Amino acid sequence: MEINEDIVIVGAGIGGLATSLGLHRLGVRSVVLESSDSLRTSGFALALWTNAWRALDALGVGDSLRQRSIHFTRFQAFSANSGLPTAEISLEADNKPIDYDSRCIKRQEIVETLEKELPPGTIKYSSRVISIQQSGLYKLVHLANKTIIRTKVLIGCDGVNSVVAKWMGLPKPIDANRSAIRGYVEYPKAHGFEPKFCAYFGGGVRIGFLPCDHKSLYWFCTFTPSAVDYDEKIEGSPTKMKQFVLSLANNVSKEAYNILERTSLDSLYCAKLKLRTPWNILMKENIVKNNTCLVGDALHPMTPDIGQGGCSTLEDSVVLARCISEAIFAKNLEDDDQLCKIIELGLEKYAKERKWRIFNLISTSYLVGLVQESNGKVISYLREKFLAQFTIETMVKMGDFDCGKLLS
């Protein structure tokens, strides 16, 4: 069976849903192909800085999500080696843009909110892409259920192991030689943790704690396996994962340690960190090719050290929706071939607008992680005396970006 669609988005994660919603707000129809049989709500939470909230406001869902999260008042950094404070920065709006905001929110809240705003039937579940073919100006998307979708525009929002990126010929993301264990804790009543981002850096680890709301907290532990006593076999054992994190957290506050201890074994997740080499992003054909383009982790997986993975995905979605809409409505074209060529100009504008921003995010995140985790004597000394303040100020600065409104 062959179906015709103008715009096909692969992946119903944050990037796919946000891109589809952006197009919908601008009067452009799209369909989203999702391999699973229902909305994927897995994953714990993510920090959203000002740039992400500006994008969510552009999509019309920012206020709804703010009601389900709490605003951070400050960012505190401590030494993972001594437990002593090394830096602090206010996250209040004083001397910052009026719309400045920083929060941590459950991933489930984000995807469910985006999904509810889409027209019924936009997401096609159980639609796993197995291959893609070029057919003149069109793409033939082959699904595992034998359906073939003929489309003018194909958008890959299918994550770090993107089928669309592979078809476009992008090199695979590289191993960052680091890993992350993440956890999530829910309390029956208020947890009492201050509305702040609290992090411990050094000795080959980064451990951070972020409240999502008054009853739940998210935490992360990134580490360099070669710098700590790490056995890869623990990845299959939640009990050993938890013991490992606790062994790295000897110098965190009692309050923070209790959060780790309280984490249930089914609320732990471990993954190796990957990134796209930043110079690959500077080549236009790695972002856009033959009316095919990429969004989010499919395009720019990065280390989590400045908390911009999800934020930059939302930026991508708003910019891409705007560029496609501007191209489509710039001229009243009825001929499909002309429309394909006009949309290609819109996608090229998207690539041009995003490439240097993405290059900076990937590079900055990697370097900040290198400084924050390093256990070298010189870097450790400089971090605790000077660089801790610099790195957290850099994190906040990279989040102060405006992707613009949907209507230019």
Image (cartoon, rainbow, N blue to C red):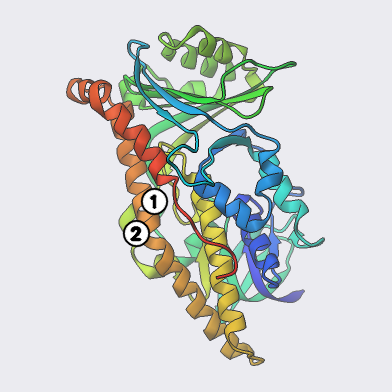
Q: Residue at x 67, y 57 (%)?
A: 128
Q: Along the horizontal axis of the image, is 156 left or right of 169? A: right
Q: What residue type is labelled 1?
A: Arg
In this view of the protein, which residue sits in the foreground, 407 or 379?
A: 407
Quick check: marks 1 and 2 in contact, CB under 8 Å?
yes
At label 2, the amino acid type is: Asn
Q: Name the residue under label 2.
A: 280
Q: Nearer the viewer, residue 52 or 168?
A: 52
Residue 264 lies in quadrant: top right
Query: Which residue is situated farthest in the front direction here?
Result: 95
Say which residue appears at 67% left-offset and 23% top-offset.
Answer: 214
Real-space Cα separation, disc 1 to disc 2, in angstroms:
7 Å
* Residue 212 locus on image (x, y percent): 62, 29
| Image location (x, y in percent) of residue 247 | 44, 11
SS category of the residue bearing label 2: helix
In this rendering, the answer to whether 199 lies above or below 127 is above
Whether residue 11 can be seen here:
no
Q: Is residue 306 visible?
A: yes
Using the image, tell me which numbered label, if any, was put on residue 124.
Answer: none
Q: Measured along the vertical axis of the image, is residue 101 above or below residue 191?
A: below
Q: Is mark 1 on a helix, strand or loop?
A: loop
Task: Identify residue for label 1.
Answer: 276
Q: Establish if 52 lies above or below 164.
A: above
